[in-house]
Amino acid sequence: MRSVRLISLFSSLLLLTGCWDQAQLNETKLIRAAGFDYLKNGKIRNTASIPQYLNTESGAGPVNNQVFHAIGNTARQSRIKLDRKVSEQVEASKNLIVVLGEDAAKKDIYHILDVFYRDPKSALNARIAVAKGKASDVISAKFKETETTMGIGQYLNESVRSAEKSSIVPSENIQTICPVMFDPGQDFALPYLVPEKNDVSVKGVAVFHGYKMVGTIFGAQGVMFTLLTGKERHLSMSLTKKITNKHKDRIMNFVSIKVKQNKRTFKVDVTPDERISAHIKLDMKVVITEYPRDNLTTQKKIHSIEQALSKTLTKDANAILKELQDMNSDAFGVGRKLIAFHNPTWKKLDWNKEYPNINYTASVNVKVIGHGIIE
Amino acid sequence: MNSSHTITHRQLFFIITQSQIGVGVLSLPYTLFVKAKTDGWISLLLAGLFIQFSILAIWKLCEMYPKQTIFDFMPKIVGTKLGAVLNFLFVAHLFSVCVVLLILYNSVVSKWIFYQTPRLVVISMLALTCVYCITCTAREIARFLMLVSPLLLVMFIFVGYAYTDVHLLYAFPVGASGIKTILSGSTDALISLLGFDTALVFLAYTQGRSNSKLKAISYASLCVTLFYCFVTFTTYIFFNPVEIVIVPEPVLYMLKAFSFKILERTDLIFLSIWIVFVTTSLISYLFFTAKGVQSIFKLKHHKSAAPYVGIICALIASIPASKLDVQLWSKLIGMSALCCSGIFPIFLLLIAVIRKRKGKGKGAVST
């Protein structure tokens, strides 16, 4: 009797694995990068990169980067069509990056992203970026790195990550943009990718208003943009700025700094007659990483550099705010502050019309705290 | 009563905490938001205050009739015949609570992990495990519930990780929705805080001073209220107020976005821990139900009732198919549970006190 019970108990262990809900890796193909474009007739083209790792004797070998296209009325339909083109089941749970074509980004991006938010298996922590021109050009870009060593998904992911590290772009993923996208009082920005002949480079940020892309901010201004979002510090937040015109050697007029600490004070005020003003104040502690003229010995000298830097950076910051107001993108969340602290005012006004006209200024205060190992 | 059946007041604390934290934690922020907007966490605190009255009533009742479960003292309070009827109704209510626990558990699990596994399999796996657990004594149940309590800390840490990406400003302006809406939100909060009513049966097994028993239950309810409040507040500052209305399980959704070097999909890990908490709630309610069935059918031991209770609950729970059915069932049963577990003990106490006074008055006349 006892042995019968034991045997039946142990044999029931076999049932524990279950028979439903299996997803076997050898029967699936993993999408590592997905791109979305609108076609002229309003349909959606989905481009997916599915790398195949070729096995060699030494273990992980070169990659065979396969790119598939499919066209459908919605993002999901194009995915289903894609599935029919690929031999095995397509799975997006390990997706690394979603790339939106510029035309797609200028329409409502939530229409495309809905499928990512709805599917319990989807990778919400995938990065998201906007491509100049067509997303399919970025995904199917063929050069040495994407074709043989890592595949386009990983390549794009790494290059966006390194841009995030040097603060050229704010770090966002599909989930982190979602609350901001829904927020009437704040907007967001995404990395802006430009496909070139031999690489895909992160050129700046694509600025959004609500669900739509409204413009771009390029290059070094991207660092200022990220600093203005109030990010405290990052691995290498570096800037090179011209501080004088006096020297005839061009290189001698410049100084390079690395931001060690960045403190933002963000004030939004409403006057009794309902005029809104916003002011962002940045207090930066920086280290000088390049200054060919040397001789940073006296307090006076350092002070003059601090002042020159503060002046140019303040100018840059104000230029960005002006640009954002012209594009009507409230990337730093003035509206959110109004909702939270001046709710009655907020309820009365039409923020889309009001925002470009508010008094919006910035000031930067630089303090040098180090200068490397020479003076 | 056999001495190996008793529990200490510390064990009572864990029993109440574990019964209270259950299915609700995943969807509570959402249900509260629908009613009270970003002030949902205030509703929750108020609800925590309200249930203290029910807790006091339950404690007083059990103090008046020591070492007896509600099914033993109900006939003594309202008379044998009415008592039997009320006992029967109360058991029916407990059945429905077990059923709704299973339904909600299934709806989450089938939505998030097991898309294709049949309902009955998912449900009976949990129900049968719980049936096995309740065939033992109250002390053994208490030990198990204590054993899994450290998992609460893990949950706390997971939710706390969300603070790496929150927008504190979303919680402002505080109190914008007005006192009325905040109060109406607290009824929904009350439903998710239910579970303290299991004290009606577990108090009978608890040893120790009457004061320390009350303290144990009150602290348990305080801990759960604060924990829920923390979870709710975190989701409110993580999601935008416009976004949260389309996310019915905000806690899981929030965790889905996080990944660590060695852990991806933290939501699935959270879900597996959450299932343990559903199990513990179900264990205490099934134990409660089995005790009720025992007293109705005058069985020798609640053990013999346990399998039937479990199987019947599992079968009923696998009926509702669509999301709307689930919503309807959980709403109806939630309201009835609120009446039976929250308000009924207070009424029972009032009747008991009045009867006792009358009894005393009569006694005084006759002497």
Image: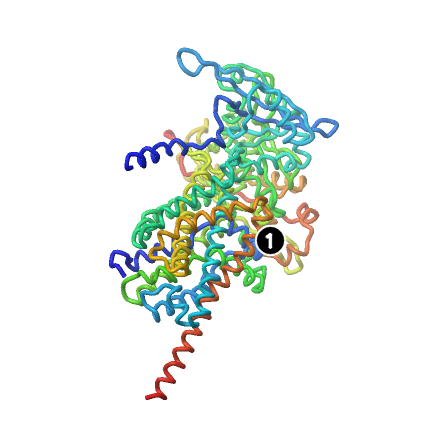
Q: Position of residue A183 (x, y in %)?
A: 60, 46
Q: Residue furthest right?
A: A41
Q: Residue furthest front?
A: A1
| Closer to us: A177 or B256 | B256
Q: Position of residue A345 (x, y in %)?
A: 64, 57
Where is mark 1, residue-wise? A339
Residue B100 placement, left or right of B64: right
Asked if residue A268 can be seen in this view, the reply is: yes
Q: Looking at the picture, does residue B98 appear above or below residue A365?
A: below
| Closer to us: A184 or B313 | B313
For residue B180, what is the image quadrant? bottom right
Asked if residue A249 can be seen in this view, the reply is: no
Q: Looking at the picture, does residue A183 appear above or below residue A136?
A: below
Q: Residue at x 41, y 15 (%)?
A: A59
Q: Position of residue A20 (x, y in %)?
A: 49, 32
For residue A222, what is the image quadrant? top right
What number of labels is visible? 1
Callout 1: residue from which chain?
A: A
| Closer to us: A276 or B79 | B79
Amino acid type of the residue that numbered disc 1 sits on in the rendered structure: Ile
Quadrant for the C terminus of chain B, please.
bottom left
Secondary element at tag 1 = helix
Q: Looking at the picture, does residue B6 appear above or below residue B151?
A: below
Q: Residue at x 54, y 58 (%)?
A: B174
For residue A119, what is the image quadrant? top right
Residue A369 placement, left or right of A157: left
